[in-house]
């Protein structure tokens, strides 16, 4: 039996594992979290017992279904929770588990690595109290706590409204929802969005609910500066509306995000090539129509292979498993892939309308960062330093910018600063974002404690 | 077709330094770099600026190079984060300590002052060292620098001095008609030059082979690691007898260490660190400096380096083709030498002579017909087997 490894136990990884088990294959599922569900259906720790309806809202049924599906597999899979893949070389993964480092060899690998918030730095973004949207959601779902008593939600994308709604529904006084996308853009995307069906209706519901509860929801907003109070934490956000008028809104926290970025580092280290998606302004791993990567034995699923959302992730997870089964000669998988592809195409249209029209990534906001604004917080690199490298040192590529300025070189490996750094570099060179390339993945994929390799012999 | 006094193949530290020195003496220079200046071994090495522990044959060159390092800021307009922190070479046994004392004695002939430190002394000065350390030798004038910055800074200074530096220019062939070299680039551009410098690093033997001088140049990929920033405490650049681990900390707090080798693919121009080597380097680094146990590794990397069987570089005129100067195969310790080698190449190209002794590095010291890859000359005074020389000097 081939050794099959699935990385990620979110909706994509869970459905992939379930499909393989049904076909009689035993897979190893490696996941960073202590329990399955991924970011979207992240489960509270056992010590916090909460009603799933409260935690996941409209998604409760889906969340429960994914959780149950995975729980039912326990006897038929090898599950490594709390385990971080830190290296990928050839057909071997280096994993840090709770009990120490461990290797996982694979003949077939399904990457269901998910996504992370896409951040645009603005003045004050590093103040205490400023979180990503995903981070704010994790606090609520996992820890049952809010990032503050009076948060502002700033950014764009469906997650902006979802998290704002979840906070407000949990009883938090949301100060404002500030969307950088314009109302006009959303209107123009309307017909594309209808293809989203239920998902679209939910979005409309969140918006209507927020408005009905008197929460200011502004389209076409621009962050200017987050100001700190006497305790050094964020106290107020200065922003501009679509007409250019300045506003100041009091708050004690900000959740910000501008869509998601696929987590492609492991794919990258497995030599899976990436291609630039000009609509989403990001790099995604190359796959065939059934979720096969261009590297033999590697399959891609979920948001890590391109942002399509949780519902699509369940389908692409199942599809990746069927592509794998098909390659092993299993009958029936080809037929199922066809069905899944038909369903996935609908999501494709909806996502395009969502990300490229309604909630377009405000590239100009990233590119127009002031020279003194810190872009890379791990290494303390400003937008000005990047522009200087482009101007004075002829840096025309993002990895070269990294070598010269240290941008993206710190512990986040460019996950936070990478998108903005790319926009700034491309803008100051007057070239396309694609032309400056993408940050190469490097081992470790996430920081590794030195102590992990000491066999418990900590000096 | 454009003609130059000197054409340089390879935009590493050596090639860029040669370009700078030559153009400062008004020679017309073209440098051809397949990718970016400093993108292989010159740019991704450990960053040690170290004379201590070198093969004695390298010391005159290292001494000369050290003087250029001292003037680097004047020369290129940036200090490239070069810091004179001292280099502390550690002994983990009495035998190693004796080796360090013996070396210190010999280094005196080259005007290099080394300070052997016994167990009490070394612990008093460097209290954070691990228990396995029995002593060491301190070289106050050694230090470290940021390798990512040096070759590009030299290249920029060379351009300012008039050199024609071409990145993304791959030389695919070269010929000599007895007077003039003709170089063919991958885009079919042809260039002419009176002299040719082969500073092609791990690909140096490819170029030398074009002129009937094959040499047994192997490749290696140093396995480099860096931690997240931790409070600054580790001032000296650390090495050990045997060279299996080397550690330095930069002012911003990150600790850079290396040991062992990853995977180098000369044909694909690709190098990768290896997880098991990283894990081993972590254990060795914590053995030297236990305090590092609480740090995290945030990045690992590698690059391709040319390695000669005796661990010494090839530097000097071709034996087959007048007008060619070779300088490659630095075997993992070219970073400190690079600036000096450029100065030497400049003298050889323009004056046909250099004041720095380089005879031990001559290209004809290998007889590659013999399977033993027998070495002649310089390895004799290193008192080590060639493979040890490579391992010992490691990547610094």
Image: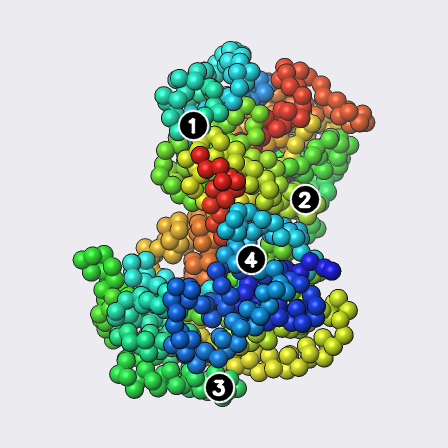
Foreground of the two, B206 or A346: A346
User: Residue under circle 4?
Assistant: A80
User: Would you say A250 lies left or right of B51 here?
Assistant: left
Residue that appears at 72% across and 40% down: B174
Q: Secondary structure at mark 1?
A: loop
User: Residue under circle 2?
Assistant: B265
Compared to B185, does A258 lie above or below? below
Residue that appears at 62% across and 73% down: A318
C-alpha separation, residue under disc 3 versus residue under disc 1: 63 Å
Foreground of the two, B94 or B217: B94
Q: Secondary structure at mark 3?
A: helix
Residue A205 lies in quadrant: bottom left
Q: Secondary structure at mark 4?
A: strand
User: Residue under circle 3?
Assistant: A198
Q: Disc 1 or 2, which lies upstream in sequence? A: 1
Q: Disc 4 or 3, which lies upstream in sequence? A: 4
Within-10-Å neighbours for mark 1: few <14, some 14–19, many 20+ = many
């Amino acid at each position: 039996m081939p050794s099959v490894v699935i990385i990620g136990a979110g909706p994509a990884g869970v459905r992939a594992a379930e499909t393989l088990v049904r076909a009689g294959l035993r897979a190893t599922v490696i996941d960073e979290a202590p329990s399955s569900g991924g970011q979207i259906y992240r489960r509270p720790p056992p010590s916090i017992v909460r009603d799933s309806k409260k935690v996941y809202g409209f998604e409760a049924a889906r969340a429960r279904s994914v959780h149950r599906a995975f729980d039912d597999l326990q006897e038929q899979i090898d599950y490594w929770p709390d385990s971080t893949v830190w290296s990928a070389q050839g057909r071997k993964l280096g994993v840090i588990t709770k009990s120490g480092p461990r290797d996982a060899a694979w003949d077939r690998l399904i990457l269901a690595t998910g996504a992370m918030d896409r951040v645009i730095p603005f003045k004050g973004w590093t103040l205490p109290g400023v979180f990503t949207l995903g981070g704010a959601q994790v606090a609520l779902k996992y820890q049952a706590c809010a990032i503050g008593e009076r948060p502002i939600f700033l950014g764009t994308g469906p997650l902006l409204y979802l998290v704002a709604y979840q906070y407000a529904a949990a009883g938090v006084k949301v100060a404002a929802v500030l969307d950088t996308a314009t109302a006009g853009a959303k209107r123009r995307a309307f017909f594309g969005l209808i293809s989203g069906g239920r998902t679209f209706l939910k979005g409309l519901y969140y918006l209507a609910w927020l408005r009905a509860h008197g929460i200011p929801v502004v389209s076409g907003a621009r962050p200017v500066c987050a100001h700190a109070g006497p305790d050094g934490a964020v106290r107020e956000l200065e922003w501009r509306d679509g007409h250019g008028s300045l506003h100041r809104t009091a708050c004690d926290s900000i959740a910000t995000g501008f869509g998601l970025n696929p987590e492609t580092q492991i794919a990258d280290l497995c030599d899976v090539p990436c291609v630039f998606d000009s609509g989403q302004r990001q790099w995604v791993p190359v796959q065939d129509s059934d979720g096969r990567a261009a590297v033999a034995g590697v399959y891609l699923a979920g948001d890590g292979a391109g942002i399509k959302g949780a519902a699509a992730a369940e389908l692409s997870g199942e599809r990746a498993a069927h592509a794998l089964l098909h390659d092993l000669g299993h009958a029936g998988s080809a037929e199922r892939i066809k069905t899944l592809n038909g369903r996935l195409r609908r999501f494709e249209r909806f996502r395009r309308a969502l990300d490229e029209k309604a909630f377009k990534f405000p590239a100009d906001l990233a590119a127009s960062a002031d020279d003194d604004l810190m872009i890379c917080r791990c290494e303390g690199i400003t937008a000005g330093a990047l522009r200087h490298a482009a101007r004075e040192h002829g840096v025309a590529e993002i990895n070269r910018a990294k070598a010269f300025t240290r941008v993206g070189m710190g512990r986040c490996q460019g996950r936070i600063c990478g998108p903005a750094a790319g926009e700034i570099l491309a803008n100051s060179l007057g070239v396309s974002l694609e032309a400056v390339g993408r940050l190469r993945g490097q081992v470790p994929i996430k920081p590794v404690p030195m102590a992990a390799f000491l066999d418990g012999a900590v000096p | 077709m454009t003609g130059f006094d000197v054409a340089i193949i390879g935009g590493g530290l050596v090639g860029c330094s040669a370009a700078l020195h030559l153009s400062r003496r008004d020679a017309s220079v073209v440098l051809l770099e397949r990718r970016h200046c400093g993108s292989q071994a010159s740019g991704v090495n450990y960053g040690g600026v170290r004379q201590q522990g070198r093969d004695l044959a390298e010391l005159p060159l290292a001494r000369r190079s050290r003087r250029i390092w001292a003037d680097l800021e004047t020369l290129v307009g940036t200090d490239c984060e070069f810091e004179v922190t001292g280099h502390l070479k550690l002994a983990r046994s009495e035998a190693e300590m004796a080796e360090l004392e013996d070396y210190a004695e010999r280094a005196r002939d080259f005007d290099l002052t080394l300070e052997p430190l016994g167990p009490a002394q070394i612990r008093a000065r460097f209290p954070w060292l691990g228990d396995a350390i029995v002593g060491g030798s301190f070289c106050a004038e050694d230090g470290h620098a940021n390798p990512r910055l040096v070759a590009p800074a030299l290249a920029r200074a060379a351009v300012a001095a008039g050199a024609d530096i071409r990145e993304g220019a791959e030389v695919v062939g070269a010929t000599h008609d007895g007077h003039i070299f003709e170089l063919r680039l991958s885009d079919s551009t042809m260039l002419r030059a009176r002299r040719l410098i082969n500073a092609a690093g791990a690909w140096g033997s490819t170029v030398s082979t074009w002129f009937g001088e094959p040499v047994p140049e192997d490749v290696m990929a140093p396995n480099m690691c860096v931690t997240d920033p931790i409070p600054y405490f580790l001032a000296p650049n650390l090495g050990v007898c045997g060279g299996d681990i080397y550690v330095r900390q930069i002012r911003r707090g990150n600790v850079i260490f290396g040991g062992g080798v990853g995977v180098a693919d000369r044909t694909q121009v690709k190098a990768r660190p290896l997880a098991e080597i990283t894990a081993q380097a972590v254990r060795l680094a914590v053995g030297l400096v236990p305090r590092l146990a609480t740090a995290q590794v945030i990045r690992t990397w590698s690059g391709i380096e040319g390695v000669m069987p005796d661990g010494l570089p090839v530097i000097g005129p071709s034996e087959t083709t007048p007008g060619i100067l070779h300088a490659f195969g630095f075997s993992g310790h070219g970073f400190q030498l690079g600036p000096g080698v450029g100065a030497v190449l400049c003298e050889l190209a323009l004056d046909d002579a250099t004041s720095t002794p380089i005879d031990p590095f001559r290209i004809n010291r290998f007889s590659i017909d013999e399977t033993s890859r027998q070495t002649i000359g310089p390895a004799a005074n290193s008192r080590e087997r060639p493979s040890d020389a490579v391992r010992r000097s490691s990547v610094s």
